Image (cartoon, rainbow, N blue to C red):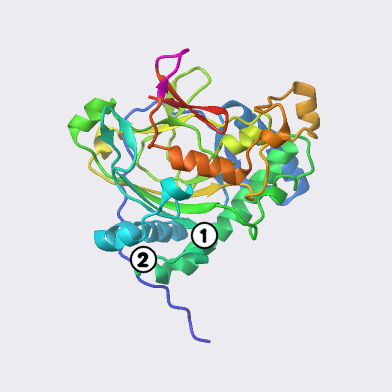
Amino acid sequence: MPSSVIPPVPHYESAPVTTEHLEYADLAVIDISQANSAEGRAQLALKVRDAMSTNGFFYVVGHGYSSDQMKRMFDIADVPFSRVNDEEKQKYVAQTKQTGSYQGYKLRQYWHIDGGVRDQIENYNINHDVTRRTHPEAVRPLLPEISQLAFHSHMNVLHPILRLLALGLELPEDTLVNLHKWESQSETYVRFMKYYPRHSEDEEKTNGVWLKGHTDFGTISILYSQPVAALQILTRDSEWKWVEHIENAIVVNAGDAMEFLSGGYYRATIHRVVQPPPDQRQYTRLGIFYFCMTDDDVRLVPLVASPLLQRVGFKRWFEKDEDAPLMSEWRKARTSAYGQTALLKSNTEARIEEEVINGVIVKHYN
């Protein structure tokens, strides 16, 4: 039988792991391979429930992709940035503000950060159905591997996590899986994201913040760990702590939609991106993400059938369920507004800026 030929791509050389002393967040490590049995899921569900109801972040290991496979995927992730010229990139720019979709490129200087400083971040976004739209020429031969990554992330990472979260709420374990079908219409997508070093003047104006503290708008965010330290989470003690790199691990956090569905029990954690430590500042920071959302037609209301929520109580953002947004509505509103709208200072805390989206106050932390 003829062997399949893997398209060659240039190797992306990532930064060495920082040797700086940083105050890291104490996050749980979940070996997802243990979720293959009912007994393993029952044990992991308690750990995941604790992680999601406290920090809102945890690590996943045992996810089924080897270190060599992930090195290959990071090489692929750099292709939309290093192997596509500016003229071709313009042809595939996402019409984010008009459509509320990130599909395609978000080029540098689109988002306003602070003090007149705009971002130095490029990302390329690909729907989990990679055939949804066309792609730059250099990306096309790599679509089978990107599609495989999306499918793997969905079925072997997202779905096991959703089963554990459902069990944590004492619901049937497929409750959340049934809201995140692979074949359904949704905006769940792969993101390749590249951060470029900034001028010292911009660092001073923004106090070293590259992305303000924010919550993600989906249900679950999956980040394949990479070595450049920059991601920080806001703990319940109101302290910013770094997220440490673990080789071939995944960093998982909850977003707004999961907080809505869980009645506030699973927190959408506030996180930000800041200037890396001194020994990594000359490097670019390349990331691979899988941003997950429910099917478009799911209404974001609390899962009130949960025995746990009935015991401990839950929050409603809307008096009537029919007033709550559909996933598609929430996603479009949050996406089109991010980095483009004027934020108002909070009346309660100086570092918080706010905007109102679909009747919900969305906070940003500078």
Quadrant location, the C terminus: top left
Estimate the x, y position of residue 229 in percent, counting from the top left: 36, 37
Estimate the x, y position of residue 251 in percent, counting from the top left: 50, 41
Say the numbered circle drawn on residue 213: none
Q: Which residue is located at x 62 percent, y 50 percent?
A: 296
**Residue hosting label 1:** 149
The alpha-carbon separation of the residues under discs 2 and 1 comes to 19 Å
- In the displayed image of the protein, which residue is found farthest to the bottom? 1
Mark yes or no: residue 310 visible. yes
Relative to 259, is 234 on the left or the right? left
Q: Under tag 1, what secondary structure? A: helix
Estimate the x, y position of residue 303 in percent, counting from the top left: 74, 35
Q: In the rendered structure, which amino acid carries the disc numbered 1?
A: Leu
Mark yes or no: residue 47 visible. no
Q: Under tag 2, what secondary structure? A: loop
Q: Which residue is located at x 57 percent, y 60 percent?
A: 151
Relative to 72, is 172 on the left or the right? right
Choose mark 2 or mark 1, whichever is in front: 2
Asked if 116 appears above or below 171 in the picture, the reply is above
**Residue hosting label 2:** 136
Q: Earlier in the sequence, mark 2 or mark 1?
A: 2
Estimate the x, y position of residue 55 in percent, counting from the top left: 55, 28
Q: Is 248 a magenta residue? A: no
Give, as a single range, the part of the protein colored magenta: 344-350
| Crowdedness near tag 2: few (<14), some (14–19) or many (≥20) residues, C-alpha within 10 Å | some
- In the displayed image of the protein, which residue is found farthest to the top? 348
Which is the main secondary structure of the residues drawn in magenta? loop
